[in-house]
Amino acid sequence: MNKPLKNILLADVAQEAGVSTASVSRVLNRAPHVSKQLRSRVETAIEKLGYVPHGSARALASRRIGAIGALVPTLDNAIFSTGINCLEQRLKHHDYRLLIATYRYDLDDELEALHTLIQQGVDGMVLIGHDHRPSALTTLTRRQLPFLTCWHSIDDANWPSIGFDNTAPAHALAEHLLSLGHRLLAVVGAPTEGNDRARARLQGFIQATERAGCPIPPERIITVAYGIAEGFQAFEALMRLKPPPTAILCGNDILAFGVMLAAQRAGVRIPDDLSVTGFDDLPQARFMTPALTTVAVPAADIGHQVADALVARIAGETPAHRQLLDAPLVIRESTGPLNTTA
Amino acid sequence: MNKPLKNILLADVAQEAGVSTASVSRVLNRAPHVSKQLRSRVETAIEKLGYVPHGSARALASRRIGAIGALVPTLDNAIFSTGINCLEQRLKHHDYRLLIATYRYDLDDELEALHTLIQQGVDGMVLIGHDHRPSALTTLTRRQLPFLTCWHSIDDANWPSIGFDNTAPAHALAEHLLSLGHRLLAVVGAPTEGNDRARARLQGFIQATERAGCPIPPERIITVAYGIAEGFQAFEALMRLKPPPTAILCGNDILAFGVMLAAQRAGVRIPDDLSVTGFDDLPQARFMTPALTTVAVPAADIGHQVADALVARIAGETPAHRQLLDAPLVIRESTGPLNTTA
DNA sequence: TTGTACGCGTTATCAC
DNA sequence: GTGATAACGCGTACAA
């Protein structure tokens, strides 16, 4: 059963089938102008010998590796892993593999990982967001490597993108709270350094409140790392303020869950005593008690569309430079009118 | 700034530095017996020309691609994405890239993906669990490809592994409930086909209850897909039973969250009216109200250790064939004594 | 439609 | 220590 100490090469298949190596290669690559008989003879030879093409040799000769690279801040964030999951599945349909690198929101690490992936010879690259080291762009364009950014909506001639507006829904969320009568708002956001999405959301919150003549003072805007525990602690910090906020805008659902769970522990009723909003619409959001008001981020769609568009670019096509997906507000029960009887 | 229409090759570097291509290659690969001066001359030439090694050519000549493959059921499961995240980070330290393929618990897909990754030329392979098509093993061993399985504890001479016991903690969880006086137990488990971990956990539940003389009848063991919504619905189905269970054992934390949130909605108090257990210890678990009793799965550790061990195997070493990590019970507040006053 | 022969960019095996 | 040069395994003009 344990056959090949010596590897079986394309040449062996050619010999077995009694044809040239070029013909075998043609069969392998579904080239046109191959007679039925030749094809079947080659195929049986491949079957018989258990031949498997050598990826690297193939890549070297064809200048195509059959894999694309993805640079992701982290996979330890449900919304990213969902997107990547879809991206990979879709790429598989196009017969592309996925090479992943994470950089934990450190743009220098991202740049380094970019170089590594390019060196590996990826046929295309996916990056998250709009914040990158300038030299990333230089590298990408100089190499003429097809690439795409996602998760943001910034209109930039240099960076083709498939994403959604982070600011507008954030703005709408804040307006929603204001319209419910809330004036004592607070924000629990993710760190904005190297993270344009977090920045865009924060700006949405700030703009809406300033425009309404009720700006959020800096001490009511706190920045914490991604995590339930972080949201939990943020709630505690905010509720120590005098007076405590009547509504908390969170930069993402996980932080919102942390806030909600902390409130539950503290006996603070949502939305009666406190309104809370998230951003992402993770599966949990609608099952929380109360169900979380949030923004539905099209993570799966992005994964699919990025795969399609990037493959198209690799094939030499030029799909839309910028593509905007919908990220609708989902108003649920975690937000309610200001309780004036309290 | 946009230099190379013509790619810069190793030969160009050699010429620029006035040395042979062999020497450049030696410098690149940190080979011994290279004089300081030659090294620095080559390095400045590389710098000056902005040379980047060609991965495929390198792989072809060296028979080493610098990437390992991972076959994962899905990334859309926090516990896997956490593990993969750590795996990737650790691999990076060893200067290896990560090629990912998902198969949605379909073992035929897994086998196909295995072939694809092998064809890509990965230097090693990571698989989840012990359930695989037999021919996967044949392929792996015939190719003499270093590989490792994880997340399970099955002692099998064919499959080296780094994992944890799924059965014992499940057993302990059930015993914990029994010791609290519960006799009307129910199980919400994940599909067991092609998933030895789910099967092992289920067996733990069943064994413990049978041994205690209080077996769980089949209609109280329901199988649902991974997801909050699925757990939610499972709760509703189980509570329609006459009599309803007083404790529910869930196959993973996400299902448990679904059950808890459904209970909350239904006004069923946990643990007073119903005890609930999970499995995984996701970050949320300790923040739920009440905090979830569960089993802490060492996802991050597995990621790290798998990376180290696989790299060691690739380097020709033979680390432990089977390595067991701890998966401790975490008793929190979602389980309590049987309420006899109800 | 099929075959020949060369090129892809490195690494590795020799000599020196 | 360093330099020629032959692999590495396949794709693809070009010729037939």
Image: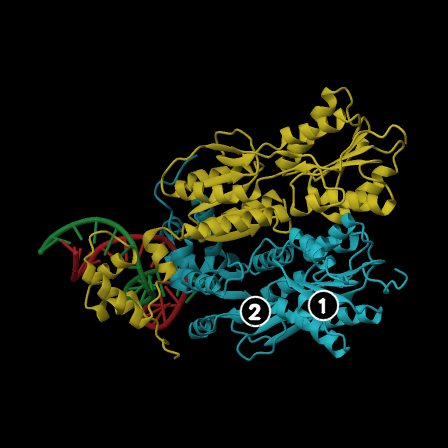
Chain colours: A cyan, B yellow, C green, D red
Sooner in the amino-acid sequence: mark 1 or mark 2: 2
Residue for point 66% across, 33% down = B201
Residue B232 on image: x %, y %: 79, 46
Regarding residue A165, the answer to whether it shows in the image is: no
Can residue B152 be seen? yes
Q: Quadrant of residue D10?
A: bottom left
> What residue would you read off at disc 2?
A149
Identify which amino acid the numbered label 1 is placed on: Ala
> Can you give x and y, in whole percent of width and height, for residue B240 in the image?
88, 38
Chain label for disc 2: A
Do callouts 1 and 2 point to residues on the same chain?
yes
Taking depth in this image into account, of A85 and B93 the one nearest to the observer is: B93
Label 1 resides on the chain identified as A
- In the image, taking residue A1 as reference, residue B15 lies left or right, namely left
- Res A333 → quadrant: bottom right
**Where is mark 1, residue-wise?**
A327
- Helix, strand or loop at mark 1: loop
Residue at the image position 27 percent from the left and 65 percent from the top: B43
Q: Residues within 10 Å of mark 2 (few under 14, many from 20)?
A: many
Q: Are marks 1 and 2 in contact (CB under 8 Å)?
A: no
| Left/right of residue B73 with respect to residue A52 in the rendered view | right
